[in-house]
Image (tube, grey):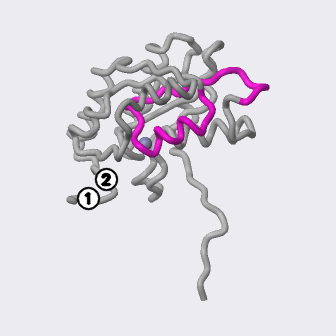
C-alpha cells in the first residue's frame, strides 16, 4: 500500500551551534561575509555538505538571525542549499513566512556564492530587503556546479522587487573555499550528473 512521509525535516551539523556563537555582531557586510565564509570552510572540513554557507542578519543591528550551510549530500535533499536552510531557520525562529513583515526589522541574506535559480526565487519570496554575495555564479560553474536557469539581469530584477544587491564581497576568499572543496575531492552534485 502506498504511503508517504508525513513530515520532512533536516538535521543541522553538530558543529554549527557553537560556531554560530563565535559571530561578533557587526553591520559591516565584509565582516559578516568573512564569518559566512568561515562557516562554508568549516562545512567542507567537517564533510557535512557542499562549500556554501549563508546567513540572515538584521540590517540595522547586525544581529545574526540564522546560519545555514549546504546540506544536500549529507541530508539527501536537493533543496537544502545554504540560502534555503538559512531562510527556513530564520522564518521558523521568527515564526513567519515573511522576513519583510511590518512588525519586523529589515533583514538581509549574506551568501558565500551568488544564488542559483532556486535560491534566486527563494530570495524574492523570503522578504529580505538586501542580498550580499561573495563568489560569482561563474566561479561555482567553473568547478562544475550547475546553477540552473537564472534570468539575465537577475540582480536588476531583485532591485525591482525592492531587494538591494551587493556583489563581489570577499570574492577571492569565497573562491578559495570552492577550490578547497575541489582539492578535497568534494562531490560535485548536479541534477544531471555527467549530462
Ligand atoms: Zn541555491
Report the residue marked by disc 2.
189
Q: Alpha-carbon neighbours of circle 1 within 10 Å: few (<14), some, or many (≥20)?
A: few
Q: Nearer the viewer, residue 58 or 97?
A: 97
Q: Do the residues labelled 1 and 2 touch (CB within 8 Å)?
A: yes
Q: Position of residue 107 (x, y in %)?
A: 62, 24
Q: Is 24 left or right of 156, judged from the image as shown?
A: right
Mark 2, residues whose alpha carbon is within 10 Å: few (<14), some, or many (≥20)? some
Answer above or below: position of 3 versus 142.
below
Residue 20 appears in which quarter of the rendering? top right
Going by the image, does 31 lie left or right of 146?
A: right
Question: Eyeballing the image, is 25 above or below 160?
Answer: above
Element carrying mark 1: loop
Q: Residue at x 37, y 24 (%)?
A: 134
Q: Which residue is drawn at 45% across and 45% down?
A: 118
- Residue furthest to the bottom in view is 1
Magenta highlight range: 101-128
User: Marks 1/2: CA distance?
Assistant: 6 Å
Can you tell which mark lies on residue 124?
none
Where does the N terminus fall, quadrant-wise? Answer: bottom right
Can see residue 21? no
Q: Residue 100 in the image: x percent, y percent?
A: 68, 29
Rendering quadrant holding ligand 1: top left
Q: Is mark 1 within 8 Å of ligand 1?
A: no
SS at circle 2? loop
Residue ID for mark 1: 193
Q: Nearer the viewer, residue 58 or 183?
A: 58
Left or right relative to 33: residue 192: left
Q: Quick check: is 108 in the magenta stretch?
A: yes
> Residue at 38% across / 30% down in the picture?
153
Q: Is residue 78 visible?
A: yes
Give the residue drawn at x 41%, y 43%: 117
Occupied quadrant, residue 98: top right
Amino acid at each position: 500500500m502506498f504511503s508517504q512521509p508525513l513530515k520532512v525535516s533536516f538535521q543541522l551539523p553538530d558543529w554549527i551551534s557553537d560556531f554560530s556563537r563565535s559571530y561578533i555582531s557587526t553591520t559591516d557586510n565584509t565582516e559578516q561575509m568573512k564569518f559566512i565564509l568561515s562557516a562554508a570552510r568549516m562545512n567542507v572540513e567537517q564533510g557535512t555538505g557542499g562549500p556554501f554557507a549563508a546567513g540572515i542578519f538584521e540590517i540595522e543591528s547586525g544581529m545574526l538571525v540564522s546560519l545555514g550551510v549546504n546540506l544536500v549530500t549529507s541530508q539527501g535533499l536537493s533543496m537544502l542549499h545554504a540560502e534555503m536552510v538559512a531562510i527556513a531557520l530564520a522564518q521558523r525562529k521568527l515564526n513567519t513566512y515573511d522576513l519583510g513583515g511590518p512588525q519586523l526589522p529589515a533583514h538581509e541574506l549574506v551568501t558565500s556564492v551568488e544564488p542559483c535559480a532556486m535560491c534566486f526565487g527563494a530570495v524574492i519570496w523570503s522578504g529580505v530587503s538586501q542580498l550580499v554575495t561573495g563568489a560569482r555564479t561563474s566561479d561555482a560553474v567553473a568547478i562544475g556546479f550547475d546553477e540552473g536557469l537564472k534570468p539575465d539581469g537577475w540582480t536588476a530584477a531583485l532591485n525591482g522587487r525592492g531587494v538591494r544587491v551587493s556583489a563581489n564581497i570577499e570574492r577571492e576568499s569565497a573562491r578559495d573555499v570552492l577550490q578547497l572543496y575541489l582539492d578535497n575531492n568534494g562531490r560535485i552534485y548536479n541534477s544531471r550528473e555527467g549530462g
